[in-house]
Amino acid sequence: MKREILTMLRENGEYVSGQQICETLGVSRTAVWKAINGLKAEGYEIEALQNRGYCLVSAPDVLTEAEVGSRRCDLWKDSPLVVYDETDSTNIQAARLADQGAPEGTLVIADAQTSGKGRRGRHWATPHGISLAMSFVLRPKFCPEKASMLTLIAAYACREAVSELTGLEPLIKWPNDIVLNRKKITGILTEMSMEEDYISRIIVGIGFNVGQDHFDGELKDKATSLYMETGKHYSRAALACLVMKYFAVEYRKFCEIGDLSFLCDRYNDKLVSRCREVKILSPGAEWNGTSLGINSEGALLVRDSSGKTQEIIGGEVSVRGIYGYV
Ligand code: BTN
């Protein structure tokens, strides 16, 4: 019931009468009063005026089913939502739900992960209270070869979400890292499962550094957080819902069109390496070239020293700045 009450308070923006809440939800006044008190105990500031009802003044930065669910405004907002205080990995949990039949748009969120998975077998740290770990289920009808392009769509959606939430202008490091001041704030891990020659499910997993105040060791020069960049605290639930909103819009277009032609210009406009010299690291080879941007298949076009344009496809290849990560 907390989710429904928060949804009503958020949608209305003003006072909502106790009577209206009771009638809409089909519950007693006492039940509403209890739920409101429960929300206040969790840190919500809810003003109650005798003749006007309830008004949501502020919300805590919590990751709960009520907080995330009442903010969802994407195409899949009625799909299942599972929120953990702590889990091994939201990608693992989303895959488990998908394998049990969970529909497209099912969203799994965690406040902390004990075995967060990064790309190339690396660990992704997700400490309590300051990180956002989210994974969602997709069941596209297109062929498996197109799946890697979803990661670029996710990167674009994350960039837009951060921009809307903070007013900052993060950039994309091809294919799918989001950077602020040349340091990473977001990582994306897309995992696909196939049956014969079709996709049975895809899990898009996204990790955001939101409230960290420092990074140690090898991450010190490579990672940053929204807090470190702005000195401000942001709602992780709001961020997750913005990502879903932007992703769903672009994903729908992608499913219709079948390539990234509709997104190339917008993606390239935010590409950190565009028109800059980059280092291409592939197994057994390393060369420098000029990054030109992505094509409609999501490959990065890089002009080599002979003037020839090469198509860099994800997977084993990584693209760096010539002096470091970006
Ligand atoms: C990377 O190495 O850049 C990708 C990191 C992806 C981390 C996210 S956090 C949510 C989801 N669950 C995981 O275990 N990994 C992804």
Image: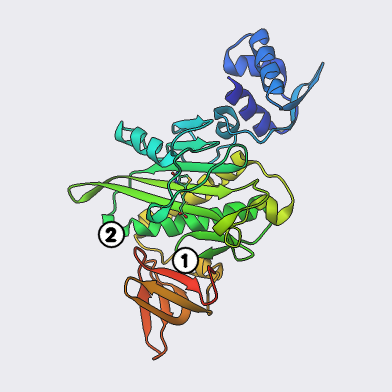
Residue 126, image x, y percentages: 53, 43
The reply to whether dot 2 and dot 1 touch (C-beta < 8 Å) is no
**For numbered disc 2, what is the local secondary structure?**
helix
For the rendered model, the colour scheme is: rainbow
Look at mark 2 in the image and give the residue it sits on.
Answer: 145
Q: Looking at the image, how many numbered discs can be counted on the residues?
A: 2
Q: Nearer the viewer, mark 2 or mark 1?
A: 1
Residues under labels 2 and 1: Cα distance? 18 Å
Q: Amino acid at mark 1?
A: Trp
Q: Is residue 79 left or right of residue 4?
A: left
| Residue 266 appears in the picture as rendered | yes
Q: Residues within 10 Å of mark 1 (few under 14, many from 20)?
A: many
126 with respect to 135 (left or right): right
Q: Which residue is mark 1?
A: 174
Q: Secondary structure at mark 1?
A: loop
Furthest-bottom residue in this view? 306
Which residue appears at 42% of the width and 47% of the height? 204
Determine which quarter of the picture holds residue 180. bottom right
* Residue sitting at x 46%, y 76%: 279
Whole-percent x and y of residue 136?
43, 42
